[in-house]
Amino acid sequence: MGLKTKAVAHVFGVLSVIALVRAAAAADDQAATATNAAVAPDTRYGLFNGLDHRSAYTREVFPEPFLVNDMALEENELEFTWLHTKGSGQQSDIGSVEIQKGLGLLTLQAEVPYERIVSPDHTAHGAGNIELGARYPLYQFVSAGRIVDATFGMAMEGGIPADSTVSRNAEVVPQIFNDLRLGGHFTVQSVLGCSTLLGGGEDGGLRTFEYGFSFAYAIEHRELPLPGARQFIPMLELVGATALNKADPGRNSLLGDIGFRAKFNPVGRVEPNCGLGWVFPVDSAARAELHWGFVASLIFEF
């Protein structure tokens, strides 16, 4: 399949999802209209009235993903993550500290990773790119019965090289995202972006189309009374990258992970939650680089 054909397939897939959401929303709107004859008040606000006060985007209903970039609104959050992978005679460990700060509807984030890559004849380690990012919602669609709640927005991420053996090139990644809530339990976070590596070396100028989907189902304490946990969230994620230039344009690598998050009762002003996921390759390109892995996460919201 050619690069243009793959791009068309990606676009067609996204449009198909949007069409299904719109169809579900139309059915929800008809049901709500049939049971409520009163005229609903105007709930629009924001730039060009693109946002909706009824949306759950501002209510922390979207759990922190493992491998997919977080696109939810965060107020104050500190996260510690460890990703361990093995494959093709190579072992990789990445530990990172990330902080997110909300300023109104704008979320800012900063992440500092440390990487260690071990192969039979070489070991590389050092600080990875210092990641800085920002995201903002632009348009929200909420059906009359609130069964469909979708937030569309834009984000920008950049990587500052640490000049270590694992961090040589700066990176710029403009992104678009959608945070979708269906009913009271199921959420999907989707993000599409184009990464460009800046600087010299063999990776300088490399452009990659990146995409990710994080599916989650929130189970409340009254439905699953785990001690100390107010919410248990099974999760499934897909994250991929398609090369756009250099030696292998069109080559796609797709990873997945399956796991859970548990949100615990607050301790004072701090709300802790933890997560654990199993990482696995999905396509042949990913299997050539990774056989298995796991990711662990500890978050403090305050």
Image (spheres, rainbow, N blue to C red):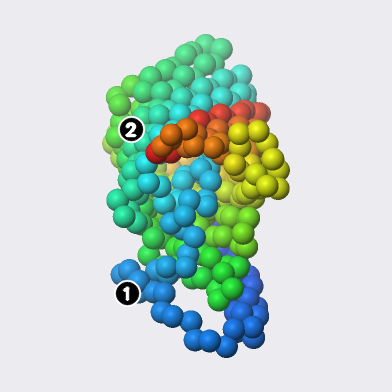
**Can I make out residue 26 in this image?**
no
Percent from the top left, x then y, of residue 286? 61, 37
User: Of callouts 1 and 2, which one flags the residue occurring earlier in the amino acid sequence?
Assistant: 1
Secondary structure of residue under mark 1: helix
Residue 64 sits above or below residue 144 on the image: above
* Location of residue 202 by image quarter: top left
Q: Which one is nearer the viewer's eye here, 2 or 273?
A: 273
Q: Residue at left 42%, top 17%?
A: 125
Q: Which mark is residue 155?
A: none
Q: Which one is nearer the viewer's eye here, 229 or 285?
A: 229
**Can I make out residue 54 in this image?**
yes
Q: Which one is nearer the viewer's eye here, 288 or 220?
A: 220
Percent from the top left, x then y, of residue 56? 49, 60
Q: Which mark is residue 48?
A: 1
Secondary structure of residue under mark 2: strand
Q: Residues within 10 Å of mark 2 (few under 14, many from 20)?
A: some
Q: Residue at left 56%, top 20%?
A: 91
Contact between marks 1 and 2 (CB within 8 A): the answer is no
Q: Residue at left 68%, top 36%?
A: 226
Q: Amino acid at mark 1?
A: Phe
Residue 100 sits above or below residue 292 on the image: below
Considering the image in quadrants, where does the C terminus appear? Answer: top left
Residue 159 sits above or below residue 102 on the image: above
Residue 182 sits above or below residue 298 on the image: below
Q: Which residue is mark 2?
A: 130
